[in-house]
Image: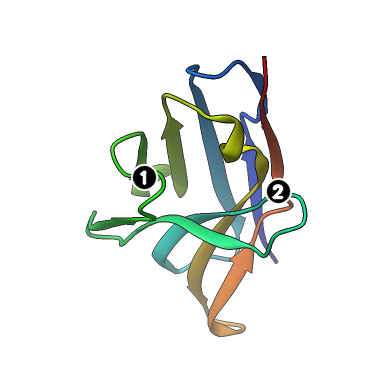
Amino acid sequence: QVQLVESGGGLVQPGGSLTLSCAASGSIFTINDMGWYRRAPGKQRELVATITNGGSTKYADSVKGRFTISRDNAKNTVYLQMNSLKPEDTAVYFCNADIFNAFRGTSAYWGQGTQVTVSA
């Protein structure tokens, strides 16, 4: 009964910018950590950035200084602002959230993924 829906992916040239959004809906009591992960072709899924419900953030070294994660707790939404994009940022980006509800307690939920392609 919980859904995470991502949006904002697409094709962008190197050096360009994109903003990803992920909205959580359904049976939600509280949302703890939220984050973004990505899986590049032929590689394992990796952490991109996380944010606590208090606003503390962590980033992968490869995106520090270029990506910014933020959230709007009133809208149950997490964002990923991606600047100075590089071809190696090409991947499927997945939203993740640790959500507490009355049915399952605290569980990790994933979005369906959104493709980001950085190419000239």
Q: Who's the residue at 55% across and 19% down the image?
A: 14
Q: Who's the residue at 45% across and 69% down the image?
A: 29
Tell me the quarter of the image containing the N terminus.
bottom right
Secondary structure state at the residue bearing disc 1: strand
Where is residue 82 shown, x and y percent of the image? 45, 31
The amino acid beneath tag 2 is Gly
Where is residue 18 shown, x and y percent of the image? 52, 24
**Which callout, 1 or 2, points to the residue nearer the camera?**
2
Q: Which residue is mark 1?
A: 71
Q: Who's the residue at 67% across and 14% down the image?
A: 120
Classify mark 2: residues with Cα within 10 Å, few (<14), some (14-19) or many (20+): many
What is the distance, in whole Å, between disc 1 and disc 2 at their CAs? 18 Å
* Residue 10 lies in quadrant: top right
71 or 28, which is in the foreground?
71
Q: Which residue is mark 2?
A: 113
The amino acid beneath tag 1 is Arg
Secondary structure state at the residue bearing disc 2: loop
- The reply to whether callout 1 and callout 2 are in contact (CB within 8 Å) is no
Left or right relative to 68: residue 17? right
